[in-house]
Amino acid sequence: MYQVLVHFASANELVMSLDAFLYTPNKGMEMGADWVAQVRGRLGRELSWTTPSDPYALSILAWQWTGGGGAAAPAPDAGPADYIDWLAGLSPGELYERMAPYVPPQKTEILRDLGAWQSHVLGLLRTWHDGYFAGVGPGALGRLATDAQHRRAQAGSMAAVDLVETATTGFVVESDQIDQLLLIPQMHFRPLIRYAKCNRLLVVHYPVETAEAQPGAPGPDLMRLVRALADETRLRIMHFLTDSRPRSFTDVMKHLGMAKNTTHYHLSTLRTAGLVRFHVTGECETLHYTVRRAALDEIGPWLHRFLDKR
């Protein structure tokens, strides 16, 4: 069984917010196309990753910067700008030693010219920090840090699989191909989950609500749940998934006779509402689905809490 490591530093959200900005398409993200267009107008230059592995490499480096993997931790008040300065101070040889253990054989292009890679990502991070991230309020980042602290406390009494599923509302990792799972809260991809297998380490960025619900207004988690259930096709999918055997994407598509894009849309809606589990096994690339009955048990209490005016 793998070990769960819960981690958060504001540098993680610096990286994930930039990844959310560059992510195409932005479908399913609460901070979607309008946010991207607004921020793009402020930056004054086009941004792009060097390789698809860039955000995960930078997340692992942020973990190492804060003491992960046995490295010395920075000062407690260190922030994203300090992370950028630390990254700038690493030699290509030091970068190689830190990154190589986590780069799969099929993605080694990121290691071929680490000096050029370092220069490119430093330019990206500085532009992004000065043009956008420096304006992100400390309250939201504080809620991410608090959630990470809560998950660390849970780790002492929960099995690894259960801890990950609870934090992610349905992401079930059942793989013997990983030794460690790095669990990192994020808000810019909300309500989506981002994950990548980096050799024997699985990096999982899970969504956290960072805004308080307005008085008299339902919270976003309740709204996602209600919207997901208000559709006949999605209810039929849930009925199909109620047996004990996990079903593949193709199973769902064939059973209901739907097109690939339509199936993906409905399953994604159910996943982000926490109504279905998505199981990953082996190399963590194949998904299978089951109904998440815990979410069904939560519907009544959530509605009662919202409707109770006492």
Image (cartoon, rainbow, N blue to C red):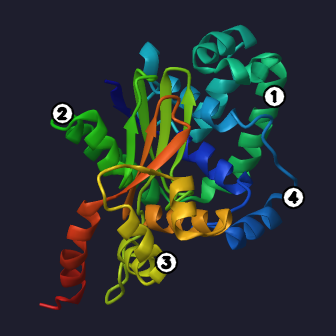
Residue depicted at 53% across the width and 40% down the height: 286
Numbered badge on residue 49 = none
- Mark toward the start of the polypeptide (1 vs 3): 1
> Outermost residue, left direction?
310
Residue depicted at 48% across the width and 29% down the height: 282
Along the line of sight, the residue nearer the viewer: 207 or 58: 207
Residue 34, position in %: x, y? 71, 73
What residue is shown with label 4? Answer: 44
Name the kind of residue labelled 2 in the image.
Answer: Gly
Q: Secondary structure at mark 4?
A: loop
Q: Secondary structure at mark 2?
A: loop
**Separation (CA) of disc 1 from disc 3:** 48 Å
- Mark closer to the observer (1, 2): 2
Numbered badge on residue 119 = 1
Instruction: Judge the density around disc 4: few (<14), some (14-19), many (≥20) Cα neighbours within 10 Å.
Output: few
- Asked if the residues shown at circle 1 and circle 3 are in contact, with their CB atoms under 8 angstroms apart, the answer is no
Residue 18, position in %: x, y? 67, 49
Residue 52, position in %: x, y? 72, 37
Name the kind of residue labelled 3 in the image.
Answer: Thr
Dividing the picture into quadrants, the one containing residue 236 is bottom left
Name the kind of residue labelled 1 in the image.
Answer: Ser
- Mark closer to the observer (2, 4): 2
